[in-house]
């Protein structure tokens, strides 16, 4: 089967989903209004609350939600065959992720840009908020620490990616200054910025940058982790207009061009998919497709982290409420397109089935290596570009996706800690600098405390990322669904995804619990048990919240004559 059919079919489905389904959800369910004054205007402070052009904000949102996970998850999940991964990415993006991301943005904007975690107390109850806060903290801890480790590994393995990755920061600072302080339009800064980034990608092969092992008694990998968290600390405190917005916007353009290059190369080369549609020759130890597929591919189908971004940074920058459809739903479509491209290149980027099976000889195989090498083979074969350049291009794509997510993740962690300060009356936690210090210290404690001098401690918790992420998505859909019921609007469009996600997450948690017990992985076993209990509590709180909302509506309607 030609990979063109997979690529074109998936993109066509995304286009129809955005044109038709997102319009229905935005107009009939969430009922977005252009006249509603968004928090970016009512609470504008020039630091976190800044009215933003919808194209710039889409770039921030897309690159913040599309970290390394929509590459890693699908690249691992194709071990079950390309068909299950393809169907979950396409259907999950249209009917789950778009509704979830747009809904989280709408709910936050309608409540003074409060995070989904803070909204939970008002909408569901205090107990649900406590569960939500635990899940959010664990997820952000995993995301920030693991992405720091992943970027550091890519810098060490591919030193040609260092120059273009850090050059993107300098380009972003210049663009932010030109747009917000000099009043320059988007066109020329965008064109010059993208061209500059691709020039640095080309130069990266000639100017590789590598750190020397032993500096400060640390390996190069650990040094990069420290440097990345120092940068993330500064980035989380700077005004969003100066670095976060322009960095995400220009990265979004560069990454969108990179996706375009991948898809054009697929069309020109027309490679055949060598992987089976349904793999019946699974390596020993591969977990069952159901329910593990639905937590292995979280980002790229539906992801709770997106709700944190939508209600954490994006809602504070939304200029008009009607922009939420473009920013939220289309942002999910952008990530789905990345996951789709990953499925295509990891199943059609190799010459033979035997070569593919060699890379997927165990569960967890493939991953970023399959994406970079398979994608480089497709680009080199389809466009005639040097393979070394293609490898650098795709590595930089992965670094920039992970880097922008890490930037936003640390800022979100700061927001959450500040909200804890308000909720529990701890004024010192509301200070931006102290909250950031606490957030980064927790990440570094996990990285170096659990991982020693290597700094790789975050990877210990990574097996729980998928289930934690999907539980958070279920919690977010719960809050949105209860809000819809209270507003007497149809809630089935969020309820059905909620029920499906909670079911698959609980089944996956039970499977992992038994697996961790058999492997004597006691830390993961304990955390899995905590998350499983949280999932059950969420299910019970969901039922209770809906019953209360229904009773209120019945009482408000009065007796039937």
Image (spheres, rainbow, N blue to C red):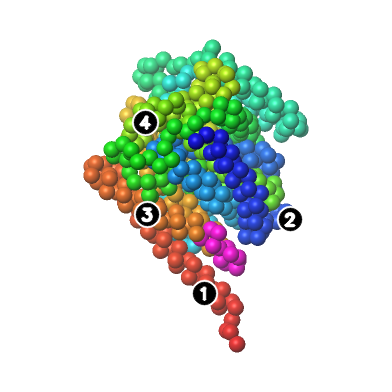
Q: Residue at x 45, y 56 (%)?
A: 500
Q: Quadrant of the C terminus?
A: bottom right
Disc 1 or 3, which lies upstream in sequence?
A: 3
Q: Position of residue 40 (x, y in %)?
A: 67, 47
Q: Nearer the viewer, mark 1 or mark 4?
A: 4
> Is 490 one of the magenta-colored residues?
yes
Instruction: Report, in whole angstroms, how far the alpha carbon at label 2 lies from the one at label 4.
Output: 56 Å
Q: Answer yes or no: is residue 495 visible.
A: yes
As drawn, the label of residue 551 is 1
Q: Residue at x 26, y 41 (%)?
A: 521
Label 2, on which residue?
35
Label 3, on which residue?
506
As drawn, the label of residue 23 is none
Disc 3 or 2, which lies upstream in sequence?
A: 2
Q: Residue at x 46, y 20 (%)?
A: 158
> Is 474 one of the magenta-colored residues?
no
Instruction: Report, in whole angstroms, how far the alpha carbon at label 3 lies from the one at label 4.
Output: 31 Å
Label 4, on which residue?
357
> From the viewer's perspective, is residue 527 above or below residue 30?
above
Q: Position of residue 372 (x, y in %)?
A: 48, 26
Q: Position of residue 180 (x, y in %)?
A: 71, 34
Q: How busy is the neighbourhood of tag 4: few (under 14 within 10 Å), some, or many (20 plus)?
A: some
């Amino acid at each position: 089967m030609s990979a063109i059919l997979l690529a074109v079919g998936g993109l066509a489905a995304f286009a129809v989903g955005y044109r038709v389904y997102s319009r229905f959800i935005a107009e009939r369910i969430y009922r977005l209004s252009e006249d509603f004054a968004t928090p970016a205007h009512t609470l504008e402070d020039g630091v976190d609350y800044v009215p933003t052009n919808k194209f710039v904000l889409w770039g921030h949102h897309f690159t913040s939600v599309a970290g390394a996970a929509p590459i890693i998850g699908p690249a691992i999940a194709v071990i079950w065959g390309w068909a299950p991964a393809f169907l979950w990415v396409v259907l999950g993006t249209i009917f789950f992720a778009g509704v979830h991301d747009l809904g989280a943005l709408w709910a936050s904007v309608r409540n003074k840009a409060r995070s989904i975690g803070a909204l939970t107390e008002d909408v569901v109850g205090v107990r649900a908020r406590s569960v939500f806060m635990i899940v959010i903290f664990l997820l952000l801890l995993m995301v920030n620490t693991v992405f720091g480790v992943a970027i550091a590994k890519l810098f060490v393995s591919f030193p040609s990616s260092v120059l273009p990755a850090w050059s993107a920061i300098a380009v972003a600072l210049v663009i932010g200054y030109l747009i917000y302080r000099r009043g320059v339009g988007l066109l020329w800064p965008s064109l010059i910025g993208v061209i500059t980034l691709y020039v640095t990608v080309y130069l990266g092969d000639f100017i590789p940058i590598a750190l020397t092992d032993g500096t400060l008694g640390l390996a190069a990998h650990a040094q990069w982790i420290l440097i990345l968290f120092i940068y993330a600390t500064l980035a989380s405190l700077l005004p969003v207009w100066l670095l976060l917005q322009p960095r995400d916007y220009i990265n979004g353009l560069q990454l969108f061009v990179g996706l375009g290059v991948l898809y054009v190369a697929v069309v020109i080369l027309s490679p055949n998919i060598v992987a089976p549609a349904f793999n019946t020759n699974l390596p020993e130890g591969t977990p069952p497709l159901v329910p593990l597929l639905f937590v292995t591919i979280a980002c790229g189908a539906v992801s709770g982290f997106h709700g944190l971004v939508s209600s954490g940074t994006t809602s504070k920058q939304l200029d008009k409420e009607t922009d939420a459809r473009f920013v939220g739903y289309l942002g999910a479509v952008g990530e789905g397109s990345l996951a789709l491209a990953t499925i295509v290149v990891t199943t059609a980027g190799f010459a033979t089935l035997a070569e593919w099976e060699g890379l997927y000889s165990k569960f967890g195989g493939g991953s970023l290596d399959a994406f970079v090498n398979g994608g480089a083979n497709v680009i080199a074969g389809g466009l005639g570009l040097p393979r070394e350049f293609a490898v650098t291009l795709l590595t930089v794509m992965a670094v920039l996706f992970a880097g922008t997510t890490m930037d936003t993740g640390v800022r979100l962690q700061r927001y959450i800690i500040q909200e804890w300060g308000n909720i529990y009356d701890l004024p010192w936690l509301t200070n931006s600098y102290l909250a950031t210090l606490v957030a980064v210290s927790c990440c570094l404690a996990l990285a170096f405390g659990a991982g020693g001098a290597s700094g790789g401690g975050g990877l210990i918790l990574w097996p729980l990322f998928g289930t934690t992420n999907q539980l958070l998505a279920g919690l977010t859909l719960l809050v949105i669904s209860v809000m819809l019921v209270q507003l007497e609007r149809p809630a089935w469009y969020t309820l059905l995804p909620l029920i499906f996600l909670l079911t698959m997450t609980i089944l996956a948690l039970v499977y992992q619990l038994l697996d961790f017990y058999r492997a004597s992985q006691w830390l993961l076993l304990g955390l899995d048990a905590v998350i499983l209990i949280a999932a059950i509590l969420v299910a019970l709180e969901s039922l209770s919240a809906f019953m209360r909302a229904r009773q209120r509506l019945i009482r408000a309607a009065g007796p039937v004559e």
